[in-house]
Structures are given as C-alpha cells and as structure tokens.
Amino acid sequence: MKKSSQGVGGTSFHNHTFKASKAWIVEVLGQPDWVDETPEDKVQNEWCCETEDGNVFTIYDWKEYRTYSDDEMIEWHIGGYNGKVTRQAQEEIEVLLNKSVS
C-alpha cells in the first residue's frame, strides 16, 4: 500500500473498514490528500492510495461530525471501484497495523 497520484473519482464504500488513529495513517502515508476541518462535513480527511497491485482506493473518516484528536482511534472507511479492491486494501492495511503493534 502506498499513496497514489492516480484518479480516485467514482470510488465508493464496499463495507470494508479498519480502526486506527489519524497519527498512524500520517506516519504510514504522510499528510492527507484532502482535508476539510469543518466537523459538520461528512469527510474531514482523505488519502488517495493504491494496493501493491496498483488498484486505487481511498481511506477516509466518514460522518465523525466532530473534532477528534490525531491520536484517537476511530473507524476509517475504504473506498474503491469494487469490493475485491477494498478487501485487498483492508488486508494490506491490517498487515501494516499488526507490524506497528509488534
């Protein structure tokens, strides 16, 4: 998994999520590609990424509707063109999460 410069227009949620802090994602991927600090908006932070196979996906906070700390564990959504891609992204993310816990 890495950041991507490929277009992610048309990606959507396919029931794949993970729990992590924003600080962890920033450590792994760098700063978000898109930020809206208005807590009333549905998405405040989003990263454009690609799997090891080059399939694009997004990571985003969905409907937090509040200000949260960078170290707070929250649920992040994974968006992609299909469920196979978002499942693969989730698996790659979980490998990285497990490495950081070890």
Image (cartoon, rainbow, N blue to C red):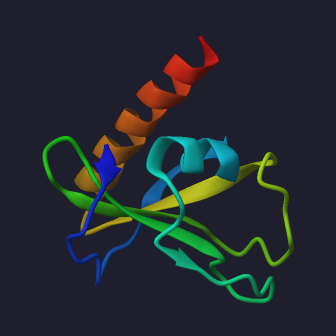
**Figure check: 53 above or below 37:** above
Of residues 51 and 88, which is closer to you in this image?
51
Residue 75 x %, y % = 67, 53
Residue at image point 81% right, 78% down: 65
For the C terminus, which image quadrant? top right
Residue under the point 60% across and 71% down = 45
Residue 95 in the image: state x and y as whole percent: 43, 26
Residue farthest toward the top in the current orientation of the protein? 102
Q: Nearer the viewer, residue 81 or 5?
A: 5
Q: Is residue 75 left or right of residue 15?
A: right
User: How far across and how far down the image is residue 94, in percent?
Assistant: 47, 32
Residue name at image x 32 percent, y 48 percent? 2
Q: Nearer the viewer, residue 73 or 12?
A: 73
Q: Quadrant of residue 61?
A: bottom right
Q: Is residue 1 left or right of residue 14?
A: left
Residue 18 seen anywhere in this rendered image of the structure: no
Residue drawn at (76%, 71%) of the image = 64
Image quadrant assignment for residue 69: bottom right
- 67 versus 71 height, above or below: below
For the question of whether residue 63 can be seen, the reply is yes
